[in-house]
Image (cartoon, rainbow, N blue to C red):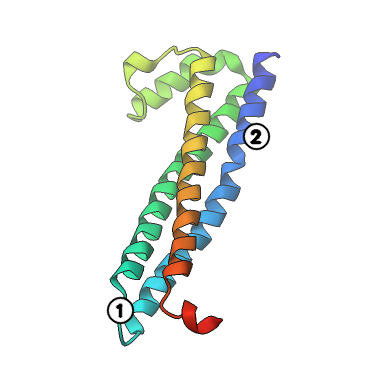
Amino acid sequence: MPADMELQVVASLLRRGRSLDQLSTGLTLVGVLFGLVQLLMPSVAPICLLLSLWMIILGLLQKYSALRVAFDADLFALLARDTERTPDLDQALQTLGLQSPKRAGRPWIERRRGALKLLRKQAWLLGAQVLLTLAVILASPWLPFAG
Protein backbone atom coordinates (compact mmCIF):
# COMPACT_ATOMS: atom_id res chain seq x y z
CA MET A 1 0.00 0.00 0.00
CA PRO A 2 1.43 3.41 -0.92
CA ALA A 3 2.51 5.51 2.05
CA ASP A 4 0.02 8.29 1.34
CA MET A 5 -2.92 5.85 1.21
CA GLU A 6 -1.77 4.20 4.43
CA LEU A 7 -1.60 7.60 6.12
CA GLN A 8 -5.13 8.40 4.90
CA VAL A 9 -6.41 5.11 6.32
CA VAL A 10 -4.75 5.77 9.68
CA ALA A 11 -6.19 9.31 9.71
CA SER A 12 -9.64 7.90 9.01
CA LEU A 13 -9.30 5.38 11.84
CA LEU A 14 -8.14 8.09 14.21
CA ARG A 15 -11.14 10.26 13.31
CA ARG A 16 -13.37 7.47 14.69
CA GLY A 17 -12.07 8.53 18.09
CA ARG A 18 -14.53 11.42 17.89
CA SER A 19 -17.45 9.00 18.27
CA LEU A 20 -15.80 7.45 21.31
CA ASP A 21 -15.29 10.92 22.73
CA GLN A 22 -18.92 11.89 22.24
CA LEU A 23 -20.15 8.78 24.05
CA SER A 24 -17.66 9.37 26.85
CA THR A 25 -18.79 12.98 27.20
CA GLY A 26 -22.35 11.76 27.70
CA LEU A 27 -21.25 9.24 30.33
CA THR A 28 -19.18 11.90 32.09
CA LEU A 29 -22.24 14.15 32.29
CA VAL A 30 -24.24 11.21 33.67
CA GLY A 31 -21.54 10.80 36.32
CA VAL A 32 -21.74 14.49 37.22
CA LEU A 33 -25.54 14.40 37.42
CA PHE A 34 -25.53 11.20 39.45
CA GLY A 35 -23.03 12.69 41.89
CA LEU A 36 -25.13 15.82 42.28
CA VAL A 37 -28.31 13.79 42.78
CA GLN A 38 -26.53 11.82 45.52
CA LEU A 39 -25.81 15.05 47.35
CA LEU A 40 -29.51 16.00 47.25
CA MET A 41 -30.71 12.68 48.70
CA PRO A 42 -31.36 12.38 52.45
CA SER A 43 -28.84 9.55 52.81
CA VAL A 44 -25.70 9.69 50.73
CA ALA A 45 -24.30 6.35 49.58
CA PRO A 46 -20.51 6.76 49.66
CA ILE A 47 -20.01 3.97 47.10
CA CYS A 48 -22.24 5.81 44.62
CA LEU A 49 -20.34 9.06 45.14
CA LEU A 50 -17.06 7.22 44.66
CA LEU A 51 -18.28 5.52 41.48
CA SER A 52 -19.54 8.79 40.02
CA LEU A 53 -16.22 10.45 40.87
CA TRP A 54 -14.36 7.70 39.00
CA MET A 55 -16.73 8.10 36.03
CA ILE A 56 -15.77 11.76 35.89
CA ILE A 57 -12.04 11.07 36.28
CA LEU A 58 -12.10 8.45 33.52
CA GLY A 59 -14.08 10.86 31.35
CA LEU A 60 -11.44 13.55 31.78
CA LEU A 61 -8.62 11.11 31.01
CA GLN A 62 -10.51 9.94 27.93
CA LYS A 63 -11.02 13.57 26.87
CA TYR A 64 -7.26 14.14 27.02
CA SER A 65 -6.67 11.01 24.91
CA ALA A 66 -9.36 12.17 22.47
CA LEU A 67 -7.61 15.51 22.02
CA ARG A 68 -4.33 13.77 21.24
CA VAL A 69 -6.01 11.31 18.84
CA ALA A 70 -7.78 14.15 17.01
CA PHE A 71 -4.48 16.04 16.73
CA ASP A 72 -2.79 12.95 15.28
CA ALA A 73 -5.68 12.43 12.86
CA ASP A 74 -5.20 15.94 11.51
CA LEU A 75 -1.44 15.46 11.19
CA PHE A 76 -1.78 12.12 9.38
CA ALA A 77 -4.36 13.58 6.98
CA LEU A 78 -2.14 16.57 6.28
CA LEU A 79 0.96 14.49 5.65
CA ALA A 80 -0.92 11.99 3.50
CA ARG A 81 -1.11 14.77 0.91
CA ASP A 82 2.65 15.38 1.00
CA THR A 83 4.83 12.77 2.74
CA GLU A 84 7.98 14.70 1.83
CA ARG A 85 7.16 17.29 4.49
CA THR A 86 7.89 14.96 7.42
CA PRO A 87 11.05 16.87 8.43
CA ASP A 88 8.99 20.08 8.48
CA LEU A 89 6.48 18.38 10.78
CA ASP A 90 9.23 17.21 13.12
CA GLN A 91 10.73 20.69 13.22
CA ALA A 92 7.36 22.31 13.96
CA LEU A 93 6.62 19.82 16.74
CA GLN A 94 10.03 20.43 18.28
CA THR A 95 9.63 24.20 18.07
CA LEU A 96 6.30 23.95 19.89
CA GLY A 97 7.76 21.60 22.50
CA LEU A 98 5.51 18.72 21.46
CA GLN A 99 8.32 16.36 20.45
CA SER A 100 11.83 15.79 21.72
CA PRO A 101 14.68 16.07 19.20
CA LYS A 102 15.51 12.39 19.80
CA ARG A 103 12.18 11.34 18.28
CA ALA A 104 12.65 13.25 15.02
CA GLY A 105 12.98 11.23 11.86
CA ARG A 106 11.07 8.20 13.17
CA PRO A 107 9.75 5.86 10.48
CA TRP A 108 6.07 6.09 9.64
CA ILE A 109 5.38 2.60 10.90
CA GLU A 110 6.47 3.67 14.40
CA ARG A 111 4.39 6.84 14.23
CA ARG A 112 1.37 4.87 13.03
CA ARG A 113 1.80 2.34 15.83
CA GLY A 114 1.95 5.13 18.43
CA ALA A 115 -1.14 6.89 17.08
CA LEU A 116 -3.19 3.69 16.99
CA LYS A 117 -2.02 2.87 20.51
CA LEU A 118 -3.51 6.19 21.64
CA LEU A 119 -6.80 5.29 19.94
CA ARG A 120 -6.84 1.92 21.73
CA LYS A 121 -6.14 3.69 25.04
CA GLN A 122 -9.07 5.98 24.38
CA ALA A 123 -11.31 2.96 23.70
CA TRP A 124 -10.14 1.22 26.90
CA LEU A 125 -10.90 4.32 28.95
CA LEU A 126 -14.39 4.46 27.44
CA GLY A 127 -14.88 0.75 28.20
CA ALA A 128 -13.91 1.32 31.82
CA GLN A 129 -16.30 4.24 31.96
CA VAL A 130 -19.14 2.07 30.60
CA LEU A 131 -18.41 -0.59 33.23
CA LEU A 132 -18.48 2.05 35.95
CA THR A 133 -21.80 3.33 34.61
CA LEU A 134 -23.23 -0.18 34.92
CA ALA A 135 -21.81 -0.43 38.45
CA VAL A 136 -23.47 2.88 39.34
CA ILE A 137 -26.80 1.60 38.04
CA LEU A 138 -26.49 -1.62 40.02
CA ALA A 139 -25.32 0.16 43.18
CA SER A 140 -28.04 2.79 43.01
CA PRO A 141 -30.08 3.05 46.20
CA TRP A 142 -33.37 3.32 44.29
CA LEU A 143 -32.82 0.17 42.22
CA PRO A 144 -34.70 -2.15 44.67
CA PHE A 145 -37.73 0.14 44.46
CA ALA A 146 -37.80 0.22 40.67
CA GLY A 147 -38.90 -3.43 40.32
143 is higher (above) or lower (below) than 21: below
Q: Which mark is residue 12?
A: 2
Residue of label 1: 44
Q: Tell me if 3 is positioned left or right of 137 in this view.
A: right
User: Closest to the observer: 41 or 147?
Assistant: 147
Q: Residue furthest bottom?
A: 42
Left or right, 44 with respect to 136, comes to: left
As rendered, which of 13 and 102 lies closer to the eye?
A: 13
The image position of residue 18, as x and y in percent, is: 57, 47
Instruction: Name the spot of residue 120 as percent of width and height, x first.
Output: 51, 36
How many residues crowd mark 1 within 10 Å: few (<14), some (14–19), many (20+)?
some
In front: label 2 or label 1 = 1
Mark 2 crowdedness (10 Å alpha carbons): few <14, some 14-19, many ≥20 = some
* Residue at the (40%, 68%) spot, across then down: 32
Is label 2 in contact with label 1 (beta carbons under 8 Å)? no
Q: Quadrant of the C terminus?
A: bottom right
Residue at the spot 60% in from the left edge and 49% down from the top edge: 19
What count of labels does the image hold?
Answer: 2
Residue 53 in the figure: left or right of residue 1: left
Determine the image quadrant of residue 136: bottom left
Where residue 63 sits in the image (x, y, percent)? 44, 49
Instruction: Name which of mark 2 and mark 1 comes first in the sequence.
Output: 2
Q: Is residue 139 left or right of residue 15?
A: left
The image quadrant of residue 65 is top left
Disc 2 versus disc 1: distance between alpha carbons? Answer: 45 Å
Q: The residue under label 1 is which amino acid type?
A: Val
Q: Amino acid at mark 2?
A: Ser
Who's the residue at 52% across and 62% down the image? 26
**Which residue is pictured at 71% across the width and 14% down the height?**
1
Is disc 1 placed on a helix, strand or loop? loop
